[in-house]
Image (tube, rainbow, N blue to C red):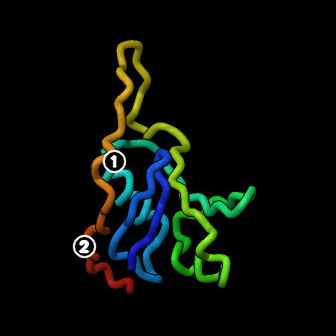
Amino acid sequence: MELKVWVDGVQRIVCGVTEITTCQEVVIALAQAIGRTGRYTLIEKWRDTERHLSPHENPIISLNKWGQHAGDVQLVLRRTGPSLSERPTSDSVARIPERTLYRQSLPPWRSSGLQ
């Protein structure tokens, strides 16, 4: 299944999302696709309300709970801060995000006994 997520004002599509895919897995796939490190969260946005999804929540299940309004709900990737390894320096240069990649598949499922 494909999941549409807004990233920096651009709608991106994450492929291979299932009902057991977690928000954390979606965030990792998107962060890798845009080539940026940091701390991110997925936000469920409907009209003027926003709700932060937890890392272990399943975005497909969350959207299904909206029923007929699911098509009106936007998922947004929001950067909440730098990664632990990022340290601001006086000579750091702001990177312009790459906007040519619009689709990103999840990494192959690891055999960890969880399904």
| Circle 1 residues within 10 Å: few <14, some 14–19, many ≥20 | some
**Which label belongs to residue 53?**
none
| SS label for mark 1 | helix
> Most extreme residue toward the top, as rendered?
90
The amino acid at mark 1 is Ile
| SS label for mark 2 | loop
Among the two numbered marks 1 and 2 on one chain, the one whose residue lies closer to the N terminus: 1
Most foreground residue, 29 or 97: 97
Task: Name the image quarter holding residue 17.
Answer: bottom left
Q: Position of residue 65 (x, y in %)?
A: 65, 82
Task: Name the image quarter holding residue 36.
Answer: top left
39 on left or right of 33? right
Q: Position of residue 54 (x, y in %)?
A: 59, 64
37, above or below 49, in the image: above
Residue at image point 75% right, 56% down: 48
| Circle 2 residues within 10 Å: few <14, some 14–19, many ≥20 | few
- Kindly identify which residue carries mark 2: 108
Residue at image point 50% right, 50% down: 40
Task: Name the image quarter holding residue 25.
Answer: bottom left
